[in-house]
Image (cartoon, grey):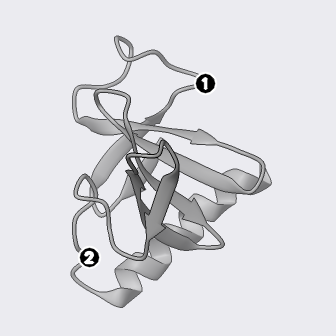
Amino acid sequence: MLILNGNYFYDRNKESNRDAPEQCSGSYTVNRKTITIFNIAGEKCGVIANGVLSKATKLASGKWWYSYCKPAIVGEYASYTQYVNDMAEAMKLLNK
């Protein structure tokens, strides 16, 4: 389970959408060097890479654009310290 700004995300590789707790806002997958965040409908909406949370937007050409802002599903953090702590916890998933 990944928690970002108080929002819960379940691991897509371990749980299905039916098995996820009701309080989950979406899901995530752990890749080799990144964590991809999906909304509850299964659409990619963000990525965590190198300890930075980025918003993912699909362009008309089919390519992905990553911008340095928080995905709407996560929301704005109340403090930078909370953001840093959440990113540190998320990056631990890459080292498993």
The single residue placed furthest to the bottom in the displayed view is 80
Q: Is residue 24 left or right of residue 63?
A: left
Percent across and percent down for residue 18 are 34, 11
Q: Is residue 22 left or right of residue 2?
A: left
Q: Which of the numbered marks, if any, corresponds to residue 5?
A: none
Marks 2 and 1, the one that precedes in the sequence: 1
> Which residue is found at the position 45% from the left and 15% from the top?
16
Q: Residues within 10 Å of mark 2 (few under 14, many from 20)?
A: some
Q: Amino acid at mark 2?
A: Tyr
Percent across and percent down for residue 75 are 22, 64
Percent across and percent down for residue 51 are 59, 73
Q: Nearer the viewer, residue 66 or 77?
A: 66
Are dots 2 and 1 in contact, CB under 8 Å?
no
Q: Which of the numbered marks, if any, corresponds to residue 77?
A: 2
> Which residue is found at the position 28% from the left and 87% from the top?
79
Q: Nearer the viewer, residue 81 or 39?
A: 39
Q: Nearer the viewer, residue 82 or 46?
A: 46
Please tell me whether mark 1 sits on a helix, a strand or a loop: loop
Q: Is residue 18 above or below residue 33?
A: above
Q: How many marks?
A: 2
> Which residue is found at the position 70% from the left and 44% from the top?
31
Q: Is residue 91 above or below residue 69?
A: above
The single residue placed furthest to the top in the displayed view is 18
- The quarter holding residue 78 reads bottom left
- The quarter holding residue 33 reads bottom right
Q: Residues within 10 Å of mark 1 (few under 14, many from 20)?
A: few
Q: Which of the numbered marks, if any, corresponds to residue 13?
A: 1
> Which residue is found at the position 46% from the left and 46% from the top?
61
Q: What is the C-alpha distance between the residues marked 2 and 1?
A: 27 Å
Q: Amino acid at mark 1?
A: Asn
Q: Is residue 17 left or right of residue 50?
A: left
Please tell me whether mark 2 sits on a helix, a strand or a loop: loop
